[in-house]
Amino acid sequence: MGRQRKRVVTGEAAPPPRKDEKPSAFHRKDKKKKVNIGKMFINISIGLCIFSLIWFFYAIYMRSSLAKRVVTLHPSPHVLDANSTDAKVSPERFWGSYRPQVYFGMKTRSPRSIVTGMMWMRQFSDLDMNLRHTCEQGDRLQGYGWLMHDGLTFGVQEIRDNDFTLTTEFVKRMGGDHGGDWTWRVTAKQHSSAPQAPVISLMFYAAADAQGSLQAHVEERNRLASITGFSEELGNFKITFRKPVTGELSSAKYATYNYLQTVSPGLEKLTDIVKYSLNRRFVYSPPSGEKKHYIGVDTYKPPHHQNQQKPDQRKESDFVVYQVTVQTPFQIEVLFESGSFHDRPNQLVGSIMTQELEKRKAEFDAKFEKAFGLEKKGFSQAYIKFGKAALSNMLGGMGYFFGQSVVQSVYNEYPLLYPEGALFTAVPSRSFFPRGFLWDEGFHQLLLSKWDPQVTREVIAHWIDLMNMEGWIPREQILGDEARSKVPAEFIVQRNENANPPTLFLALQELIEQLSSNPDKAASQPTLHFLRRLFPRLKTWYEWYNTTQTGPLPNSYRWRGRDKDTNLFLNPKTLTSGLDDYPRASHPSADERHVDLHCWMALSSGIMAKVAQLLGEPHEDYQLSHKVLSDNNLLSELHWSEQHRAFSDFGNHTEDVSLQREKVYVPPGQPRHQFPVARLVRSVRRAPKAQHVNALGYVSLFPFLLQILQPDSPKLEHIFRDMRDSNKLWTPYGLRSLSKSDPLYMKRNTEHDAPYWRGPIWININYLAVRALHYYSHTEGPYQEKAAVLYEELRTNIINNVYRQYFEAGYIWEQYNDGTGRGQGSHPFTGWSSLTLLMMAEQY
């Protein structure tokens, strides 16, 4: 056998190890490194996934949380106790004419009140249907409004229809546990110009609102003698309808009667229900006259529409109507009696009511003269009657509303319902704006605080209690279906980035001055307790403005919410400022600075400092803010235009804009009607640039209006000169809103938007101007004498024109024409236009 040869190993790879042989340390380390890197990547990937998931869910949570903030109420205790408007706590204010949207009606200050009201129509007229109920400008009444109203116990209103006048009166009497009794008296008289005595149907009604019950009691076949009812807040009650008479002590008149007992899904449906129940089958047959068929309530037959939407799902509530048809002149009384008023001395009707009414009128006259002193100032009885009407219409226009606003924030895809809430507030106009507006309300309370500071405290408390956790208050309060039915859909949703001028600080300033000047006066004493409860929310409200409405530079401010579609607006509106279409920067941007908002914040910080100081709270920061914002040098640096020698906004602006009819191409031979209608769109002829917005008008006056300027400021000389220039702001009727020489003076903003704050005279800003002139004329400085002259001229012009228009046209108006002085816009507008009374009284 051969010898085994020796194997020779050269430099090639090492032989593979045996299975039982361990790898070298180097190989083990290399493999371990690869495994560790893999694991590390896996761990990083897992970590990133987990982090992404956490971030994703956190983002969802945060968005959900932020989305809820807009509908989360402020956490601090309410200013008002939950039962503050109950009959047992505030019996004298429980019942009232708190339905400003109807010509005559009453309700309680409770969420689901039984409501009462009156409708009427003229029989045998040329108009087939002339039913009056809710205040409508389209009714074209010659005039209507309260002549006397004390806000508590009685009211007298005159409604002038085309050929007759209705005088509606009410008197309340306290007693029992549910707000006591009240009586209405309606007197009808024909106009001397009427060819014959008209026959009128009055329709008195009671309606439940989701709770309570009503039962009709009929006598003489079809005459509704009374309604009995029950509700949680009223207990048992009875409403009695007395027969018509020719006068208080006269015998009964011939009349025919109808009644309707049905149900309603909501208060906004009452007019339609009555309309759809009317029938011509009834006969009016007076003893000395021909028989005629008249229109009366019969059986309610709801209309059937082919494209009818889904049926109303709301709970239906009792609705009872009493109709009396009678020829003028006549008088009718309706008596409400509370079941818990056990010891009433007599019924509040006839001569008893007359005595009570005369007593209340005398008390009203005495209080009015004590509060405003118009007789002492030498005003005639006609001017004094006008002054009483201005106050009474604001008091008679107070409303109590309950419901939910519709709101939205940037974190909400769709609008949300705000928590239910109540609002006791005055309204700007019973016909056109019968609801609460935040910036209007501060002006309203300047007048009402002089008459009844308790009303002002309650109103401010109601508004501040509607604040959400961010410090935002919806600027337009559209509460309940009845209020919502009067508002166009595009204005219903309120957005939480949008502010309104914080005019409630003006009313607070007045309350503080009353307290400081008369600390022992009974009417002022509750103010300190009120301010203490108000302060936590007031701080949040002030901070909300200071964080959400800031401008691009330190201590500058900018209104949010300007119209974004710059293609359609000659100058995009700034509804949030309250001055709507007043010219601002032509191209909205985040670089804008608004001088009026700067001045509102200067005023607000000063009043915050005073409130904090009164309460012994830290006030230094507010005082510092007030000092900085009131610094005239800073104000000039941010807003003074040397070119026009006026205070101005600043932003991305050009004056070279106009509305032009857009061109629509129609191919030859094609019918024009098949193509879109040519719209008016904005044409920009010169590119905008960062500059002062040189629109001379109300906004330019704000440093003067809110008394931010020092009495020795040379800027006052320019302001007074522009105010007195008839080619700019001066008219014989008041200051116009925009200079006559401005390119946008009286220019339409869109095809459908007539000029609003671009020339017409507005009484709220004119009041601030008269108030400021009074201040500068009583403060030592180089312009004191000039301010005094302007004060007398401007005050006289405004008072005389508003008075003249009231007696010529029958109304106090929303605005006044700067060329003729004629009233225009919505009417009656007895919100801030009623401040004319304060100018008459020289109370600022």
Image: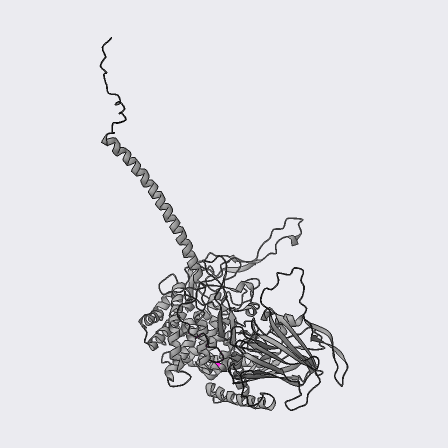
Q: How is the image coloured?
A: one colour
The boundaries of the magenta stretch are 76-90
Q: Residue 118, how many percent across, how many down? A: 61, 78
Residue 708 showing in the rendered view: no
Residue 598 placement, left or right of 124: left
Chief secondary structure of the magenta portion: loop
Residue 299 showing in the rendered view: yes
Q: Residue 194, how many percent across, how many down? A: 69, 82
Is residue 81 rendered magenta in the image?
yes
Residue nearest the viewer, comparing 150 with 766:
150
Residue 647 placement, left or right of 27: right
Residue 506 placement, left or right of 272: left
Residue nearest the viewer, comparing 570 with 329:
329
Query: What quarter of the picture does the C terminus occupy?
Result: bottom left
Q: Residue 791, how many percent across, how many down? A: 45, 80
Q: Residue 645, how many percent across, how many down? A: 41, 68
Residue nearest the viewer, comparing 678 with 290:
290
Query: What quarter of the picture does the N terminus occupy?
Result: top left
Q: Residue furthest right?
A: 290
| Residue 131 against residue 680 in the figure, above or below | below
